[in-house]
Image (tube, rainbow, N blue to C red):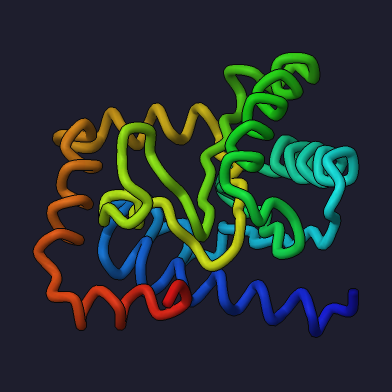
Amino acid sequence: MTSEHAAFYVEKVSEWLRNIVIGLNFCPFARKPYEEKRVNIAVCFAEDNDSILEAVLSELIKLENHSADTLETTLLVLPRAFNDFLIFNDFLHVLEDVLQMEGFEGVFQIASFHPNYQFAGTKADDRENYTNRAPYPILHLLREESVEKALELHPDPDAIPEKNIQCLTQMTEEEFKKIFTFLF
């Protein structure tokens, strides 16, 4: 794929970050690194697990080789893989094993976003699922140390998910569909 194709996905994910993750304050820790241009958005057009694993490892090594002052985190966008959320979710277990095998356990963690994200025990259309919905499958590679520092500084990190759900449930249907236009 050409860089123009990758640029399309980078722009769509940047828009999602600005409008939803930062705009709705779903992640109170996202604004600063994003505004300081310390968030890398990488696109992997692979469809097979081995190639995706290679891309994940490459991005983890890139994070390892840069300080958080220059590169805080990476969003790895997978526009051609994992249309099925359950298969994507199962792949996260493989990634956890890879983190351990490669010596990255306790150094990095991986969060996930998907157009059909669904928390256990919820219905597919429950609004709380939208806190983790994105226009494409995304693997968020985070520095464990940065996550720990951010949580220590936040007055009530345990309240973040509930606040996000409340934000979504208080929206009118029109507001909701306008925000999540990429899913409707």
In the rendered image, the residue lying farthest to the front is 123
Q: Is residue 143 above or below residue 9?
A: above
At horizontal 49% and vertical 55% (from top left) the residue drawn is 116
Which quarter of the rendering shows the C terminus?
bottom left
- Based on the displayed image, in which of its 4 quarters is residue 122 positioned? top left
In the rendered image, the residue lying farthest to the left is 170
Q: Is residue 170 above or below residue 50?
A: below
At horizontal 45% and vertical 66% (from top left) the residue drawn is 17
- Based on the displayed image, in which of its 4 quarters is residue 86 positioned? top right
Q: Is residue 46 above or below residue 87?
A: below
Q: Whole-percent x and y of residue 144?
A: 52, 28
Q: Whole-percent x and y of residue 20?
A: 35, 67
For the question of whether residue 74 can be seen, the reply is no
Q: Whole-percent x and y of residue 129?
A: 34, 50
Q: Is residue 169 above or below residue 67?
A: below
Which quarter of the rendering shows the N terminus?
bottom right
Looking at the image, residue 130 sits to the left or right of residue 143; the answer is left
For the question of whether residue 86 can be seen, the reply is yes
Looking at the image, residue 179 sits to the left or right of residue 107; the answer is left
Residue closest to the eye, 37 or 43: 43
At horizontal 58% and vertical 18% (from top left) the residue drawn is 106
Q: Whole-percent x and y of residue 8?
A: 69, 81
At horizontal 86% and vertical 47% (from top left) the residue drawn is 48
Looking at the image, residue 4 sits to the left or right of residue 67; the answer is right
Residue closest to the eye, 181 or 55: 181
Looking at the image, residue 92 sits to the left or right of residue 155; the answer is right
